[in-house]
Image (spheres, coloured by chain):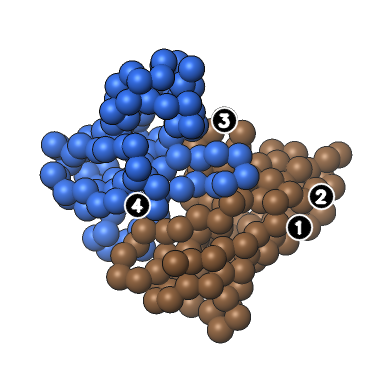
Amino acid sequence: GQNIDQPTEMTATEGAIVQINCTYQTSGFNGLFWYQQHAGEAPTFLSYNVLDGLEEKGRFSSFLSRSKGYSYLLLKELQMKDSASYLCAVGSGGSYIPTFGRGTSLIVHP
Amino acid sequence: DVKVTQSSRYLVKRTGEKVFLECVQDMDHENMFWYRQDPGLGLRLIYFSYDVKMKEKGDIPEGYSVSREKKERFSLILESASTNQTSMYLCASSSTSGSFGELFFGEGSRLTVL
């Protein structure tokens, strides 16, 4: 099985930077995903990491360390619309079926 | 624009009723999934399908069944609904050809069982 941990809730200020961590234990790792989910809406894909290092995409970046079983999602220049749940998901084994963590609810305040 | 469509956004059913949740995708994806999402528990996989007429159990299949008669359609069936099946149900699809398996989700179906 897999064990995926991420903080339940985080708060941050508009304009600031926030880092959401995700740790995992799995066998046959084949990638880590981050999804964003606004309240009442479907999750939408943010990023995918399969190799170690940082992937940057605009205000959002995602980092992976396979040896440490660790990833983070970095959100810069926070906006109120970034208030959402952020879901870490890990793919393993021979399939592309990700297992999801419980999600981190991010609240951005003025 | 790619799309996964779930037939009902909100349903209210009574205990013991048979419930059908329908999902259609227009991306010609091979893989389709049903998840349920509950506060504090995150997304949990109920069933998935790699191909037409194929189905595999996920982590929590008890009390559910699925049907995939056509590639674009994946149905979730609750044979006899119970109150502990009150939840948000999310359908998703993905491709295995030339991709890493990014999931595309529908808007969700919020089911209340009374």
Residue identifier under label 2:
A12
Residue A64 picture location, percent across and down? 57, 73
- Sequence order check, earlier mark of 3 and 1: 1
Q: Can residue A67 be seen in this view?
A: yes
Residue A51 image point, x, y percent: 48, 77
Task: Kindly report the distance in space between the C-alpha atoms of the residues bearing marks 3 and 4.
Answer: 24 Å
Please name the residue shown 36% across and 58% down the image: A97
Q: How crowded is mark 2: few (under 14 residues within 10 Å), some or many (20 or more)?
A: some
Whether residue A82 is visible here, answered yes or no, is: no
Q: How crowded is mark 1: few (under 14 residues within 10 Å), some or many (20 or more)?
A: many
* Disc number placed over residue A18 in the picture, else none: 1
Residue B70: quarter of image? top left
Instruction: Say which of marks 3 and 4 sits in front.
Output: 4
Q: Which residue is disc 3 drawn over? A: A40
Disc 1 residue type (three-letter): Val
Frontmost of labels 3 and 1 is: 3
